[in-house]
Image (cartoon, rainbow, N blue to C red):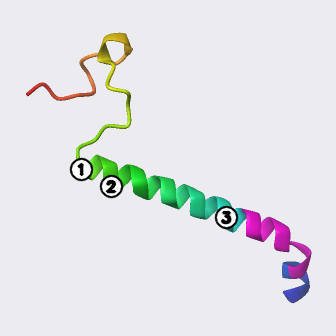
Amino acid sequence: MLPWIEANIGTILISLALIAIVALISGHLLREKRRGKSSCGNNCAHCAMHGACHCQK
């Protein structure tokens, strides 16, 4: 198994870096959602989902 790891160390390191980046972005988006912030630009007048994505209070 060690020769396989040595032969693919570049791919393994890049994959781990990409997984870490995706995890950080996902965590950030989840924290923002829990705080009630939206990931959209809140420009609903020009949005195709106008009136469908935000609750009317």
User: Would you call the spot at circle 1 few (<14 residues within 10 Å), some (14-19), or many (20 or more)?
Assistant: few
Quarter of the rendering containing residue 54: top left
Q: Which residues are magenta?
A: 6-14
Amino acid on which disc 3 is placed: Ala
Q: Name the N-terminal-most of marks 2 and 3.
A: 3
Count the labels in the image.
3
- Disc 1 designates what residue? 35
Amino acid on which disc 1 is placed: Arg
- Screen quadrant of the C terminus: top left
**Which residue lies at the image location 38% right of the left edge and 31% below the top edge?**
40
Is 10 part of what is drawn in magenta? yes
- In three-dimensional space, the C-alpha distance between marks 1 and 2, rounded to whole angstroms, equals 6 Å
List x then y, in percent, for residue 52: 26, 22
Q: Are marks 1 and 2 in contact (CB under 8 Å)?
A: yes
List x then y, in percent, for residue 13: 75, 70
* Residue closest to the far left: 57
Main structural element of the magenta stretch: helix, strand or loop? helix
Residue 45, numbered label:
none
Q: Name the N-terminal-most of marks 1 and 3.
A: 3
Please, is residue 15 above or below residue 5 in the view? above
**Which residue lies at the image location 61% right of the left edge and 62% below the top edge?**
19
- In three-dimensional space, the C-alpha distance between marks 1 and 3, rounded to whole angstroms, equals 27 Å
User: Would you call the spot at circle 2 few (<14 residues within 10 Å), some (14-19), or many (20 or more)?
Assistant: few
- Disc 2 designates what residue? 31
- Disc 3 designates what residue? 17
Q: Secondary structure at mark 1?
A: loop
